[in-house]
């Protein structure tokens, strides 16, 4: 995995429990507590799919809950 992860106190990702998953027939590594989006981004995956009509690239879009913005 790449170096995109930042260690922060109180985070929910448990780096002591590595695991793996398969997405689009490719195996990736992750940690317990990762979301699918965070694990894909940490593995350098930026293109998730393409739009149906024009074939434009689509990536991961995230929304930060209000409680995290305060």
Image (cartoon, rainbow, N blue to C red):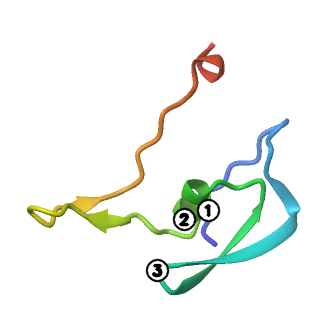
| Label 1 CA crowd tier, 10 Å (few <14, some 14–19, many 20+) | many
Q: Position of residue 69 (x, y in %)?
A: 59, 19
Q: Are marks 1 and 2 in contact (CB under 8 Å)?
A: yes
Task: Give how far across and how far down residue 26 sits, in percent.
Answer: 53, 85
Q: Earlier in the sequence, mark 1 or mark 3?
A: 3
**What residue is shown with label 2?**
40
Which percent across, then down, holds residue 35? Answer: 64, 54
Query: Looking at the image, which residue is at 58% across and 63% down?
Result: 42
Which numbered mark, 1 or 3, is in the foreground of this view? 3
Which residue is rendered at x = 65% and y = 18% of the image? 67
Residue occupying the far front of the picture = 52
Q: Secondary structure at mark 1?
A: helix
Residue at left offset 56%, top offset 70%: 43
- Furthest residue to the left? 54
**Residue located beneath label 1 in the image:** 39
8 over 43 or under it: above or below = above
Query: What residue is pinned by disc 3?
Result: 24
Q: Residues within 10 Å of mark 2 (few under 14, many from 20)?
A: many
Tell me the CA gap for discs 2 and 3: 11 Å
What residue sits 48% from the left and 33% below the top?
A: 63
């Amino acid at each position: 995995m790449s170096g995109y992860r930042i260690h922060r106190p109180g985070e929910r990702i448990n780096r002591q429990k590595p695991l793996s998953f398969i997405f689009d027939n490719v195996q990736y590594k992750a940690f317990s507590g990762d979301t699918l989006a965070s694990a894909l981004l940490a593995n350098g995956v930026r293109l998730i799919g393409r739009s149906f009509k024009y074939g434009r690239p689509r990536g991961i879009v995230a929304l930060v809950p209000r409680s995290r913005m305060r």
